[in-house]
Image (cartoon, grey):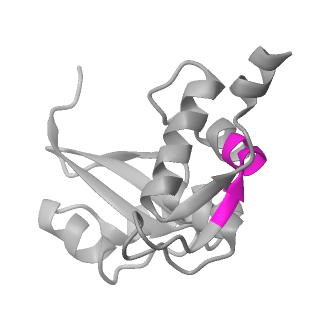
Amino acid sequence: MAREVDGFIKLQVKGGQANPSPPVGPALGAKGVNIMDFCKQFNARTQEMQGQVVPVEITVFTDKSFSFIIKTTPAPVLLLEKAKLKKGSSEPNRDKVGSVTWDDVKAIAEYKMTDLNAFKVESAMKMIAGTARSMGLLVSGTPPWETESAE
């Protein structure tokens, strides 16, 4: 028999570093989930992602048990890493704070392909490029799909 779902919790935690302090403790405690049990399981499954921000979707059941799905690192975090910046622009339409190449965008798009709503890498690249622009990052070079049609 299927377990009845009590609720969902979405968190962003650094890989391998979940502990009972906020935001993990209060979010899970409100639903009655065993916090230390979650922390141990999460840290074990994200050991290779040490220090990276990792989104996690936790499904809480009525018997206070849980299951969770680990997502890929958010695109803005990856873009800032590639551009070697601490944060994006406060006015992205006016102030450009850095740049990334189309190769960087493609690498991020391929990594995030499972979590993006796209069927082709080209579509995923357009999504990541849009995120970069909204952060005040320039995407340098010509898009790969424009160079292919010129040949």
Image: magenta residue range: 99-106
Please state the horizontal and vertical placement of residue 82, each as a whole percent of the image.
70, 64
Q: Is residue 22 above or below residue 70?
A: below
| Viewer-closest of 12 and 116 | 116
| Residue 138, x across and y down, in percent | 60, 59
Q: What residue is rendered at 63% in x and 39% in y?
A: 109
Pick the residue in front: 78 or 146: 146
- Nearer to us in this view, 27 or 92: 92
The number of discs equals 0
Q: In the rendering, at what x and y percent does residue 129 appear?
A: 55, 45
Placement of 150 over or under 20, stated as above or below:
above
| Quadrant placement of the N terminus | top left
Query: Which residue appears farthest toward the right when viewing the image?
Result: 151
Residue 105 colored in magenta in the image: yes
Is residue 113 on the magenta stretch?
no
Q: Main secondary structure of the magenta part?
A: helix
**Residue drawn 49% across the image and 65% down it:** 136
Residue 75, placed above or below residue 136 = above
**Residue at position x 40%, y 46% from top?**
68
Does residue 134 appear left or right of residue 84 in this picture? left
Q: Quadrant of residue 16?
A: bottom right
